């Protein structure tokens, strides 16, 4: 029962409807900034800041655009398959035991005789996503590019039914977050060694949330609860990059994304038949898309062999909850507080080897820290785990102008909080196609 009356931005809404299909980013239920943009870069473990020599430079390091000659374009398609486990499922707690600020659990036990928890502790999802596209050209001594990519995404679709009295308790939870960046970038070769680049991201964000609980035919106390909200809006961030060629074999790069605040306009509704509560209101939420930055190095061991390494960081400590309702009530109340997340690091390494003309083989690894504190880990929020990632890929060039790149990606992570085990497993495949005109 999705319920929204949002003020959509037509062009951005069309783009989001195309690229978000079933969900947004390949991070899926995992969180932000998964492998990055482009099958080639991902197959090198996402260690691409110091190389950035194809159309995906709009994401990795806009200074890298100076390495591209003439006119070109690229497109990426991704298909992640995700399994998430919360060993405690979702709790059914009395109000006094809930900390709603951190969304540890969302369902309230209004009658003491109700079960204290649900039983479904695992969810699986399959996504098929056009994850990015871009084009680049040269004009008046500058390299320019436009494109889109999906820097952020989260998804959960959970439901369960458990016996209670003579009947059942049925619960449903749906959450979806997608952020799409529409990018325009330019770069300039300052001298023979140094290139600088800058870009502007127009960020379109969309958040949908729905939670329902129905107690039926119990012979004790039957009731229903529902909360439904939807919102969307735009914001902006700057992207700045530098690429320095130390010598013919070594180049180093740096990138900084400023982050930005997305102003989400939406509408929410809450109801509880047990108390005859029924509330509805428009609201504004300020969603802080965090700043990210990183350093990278590329080492060309030979004409057919490249090693890369990156360090990247996201300022998740900036993330907070800021919601203001036009008509506040008991369930729809204003919120403004820190989410208590911590800054997270990613460490990446990759290799590309060209054994014969036109073919390339690639591999990589990266480690991704979770920003979530223990109190926030749950299927009702995010199952945040530190993730290990292994990537493999291949590329082929034909007709001196067409390039196809494939990537296979496996990620895994586990976490134990207060005796409860949480885990993520991801298997993903991606394909990028690019053309030099």
Image: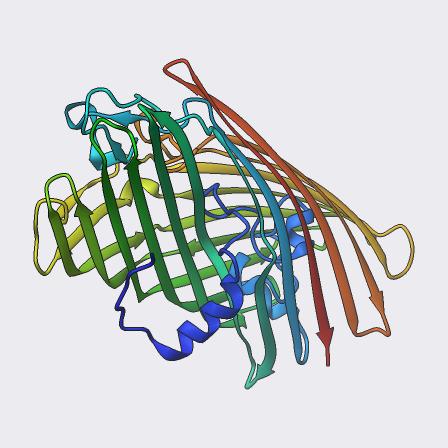
Q: Can you give x and y, in whole percent of width and height, for residue 22 in the image?
A: 52, 57
Q: How many marks?
A: 0
Is 117 placed above or below 279 here? Answer: above
Q: Quadrant of the N terminus?
A: bottom left
Q: Can you give x and y, in whole percent of width and height, for residue 9 in the image?
A: 34, 75
Residue 98 seen in the current view: yes
Q: Nearer the viewer, residue 404 or 69?
A: 404
On the rendered structure, is 334 left or right of 78?
Answer: left
Residue extending furthest right?
356
Residue 47 seen in the current view: no
Q: Residue at x 87, y 61 (%)?
A: 358
Q: Can you give x and y, in whole percent of width and height, for residue 35 in the image?
A: 58, 47
Q: Can you give x and y, in whole percent of width and height, for residue 391 in the image?
A: 69, 41
Q: Nearer the viewer, residue 63 or 247?
A: 63
Q: Nearer the viewer, residue 32 or 63?
A: 32
Is 429 placed above or below 87 here? Answer: below
């Amino acid at each position: 029962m999705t319920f929204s009356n949002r003020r959509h931005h037509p062009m951005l809404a069309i783009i989001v409807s195309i690229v978000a299909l079933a969900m947004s980013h390949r991070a899926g239920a995992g969180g932000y900034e998964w492998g990055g943009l482009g099958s080639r870069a991902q197959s090198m473990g996402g260690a691409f800041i110091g190389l950035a020599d194809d159309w995906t430079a709009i994401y990795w390091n806009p200074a890298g655009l100076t390495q591209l000659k003439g006119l070109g374009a690229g497109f990426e398609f991704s298909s992640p398959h995700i399994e998430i486990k919360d060993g405690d499922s979702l709790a059914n707690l009395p109000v006094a035991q809930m900390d709603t600020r951190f969304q540890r659990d969302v369902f309230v036990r209004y009658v003491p005789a109700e079960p204290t928890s649900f039983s479904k502790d695992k969810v699986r999802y399959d996504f098929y996503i056009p994850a990015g596209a871009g084009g680049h050209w040269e004009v008046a001594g500058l390299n320019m590019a436009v494109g889109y990519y999906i820097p952020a995404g989260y998804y959960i679709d959970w439901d369960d039914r458990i016996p209670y009295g003579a009947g059942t308790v049925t619960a449903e939870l749906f959450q979806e977050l997608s952020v799409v960046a529409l990018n325009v970038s330019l770069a300039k070769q300052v001298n023979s060694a140094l290139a600088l680049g800058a870009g502007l991201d127009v960020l379109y964000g969309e958040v949908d949330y729905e939670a329902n609980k129905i107690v039926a035919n119990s012979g004790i106390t039957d009731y229903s609860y529902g909360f439904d909200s939807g919102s969307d809006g735009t914001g902006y961030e700057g992207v700045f990059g530098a690429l320095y060629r130390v010598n013919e074999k070594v180049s180093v790069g740096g990138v900084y994304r400023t982050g930005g605040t997305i102003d989400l306009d939406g509408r929410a509704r809450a109801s509880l038949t047990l108390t005859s509560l029924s509330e509805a209101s428009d609201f504004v939420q300020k969603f802080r898309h965090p700043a990210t930055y990183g350093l990278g190095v590329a080492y060309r061991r030979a004409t057919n062999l490249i090693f890369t390494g990156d360090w990247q960081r996201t300022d998740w400590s900036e993330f907070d909850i800021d919601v203001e309702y036009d008509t506040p009530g008991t369930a729809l109340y204003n919120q403004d507080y820190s989410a208590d997340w911590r800054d997270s690091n990613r460490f990446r390494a990759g290799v590309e080897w060209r054994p014969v003309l036109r073919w390339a083989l690639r591999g990589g690894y990266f480690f991704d820290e979770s920003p979530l504190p223990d109190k926030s880990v749950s299927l009702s929020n995010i199952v945040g785990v530190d993730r290990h990632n292994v990537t493999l890929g291949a590329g082929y060039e034909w007709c001196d102008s067409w390039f196809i790149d494939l990537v296979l990606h496996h990620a895994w992570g586990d976490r134990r909080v207060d005796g409860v085990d949480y885990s993520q497993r991801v298997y993903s495949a991606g394909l990028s196609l690019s053309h030099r005109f």
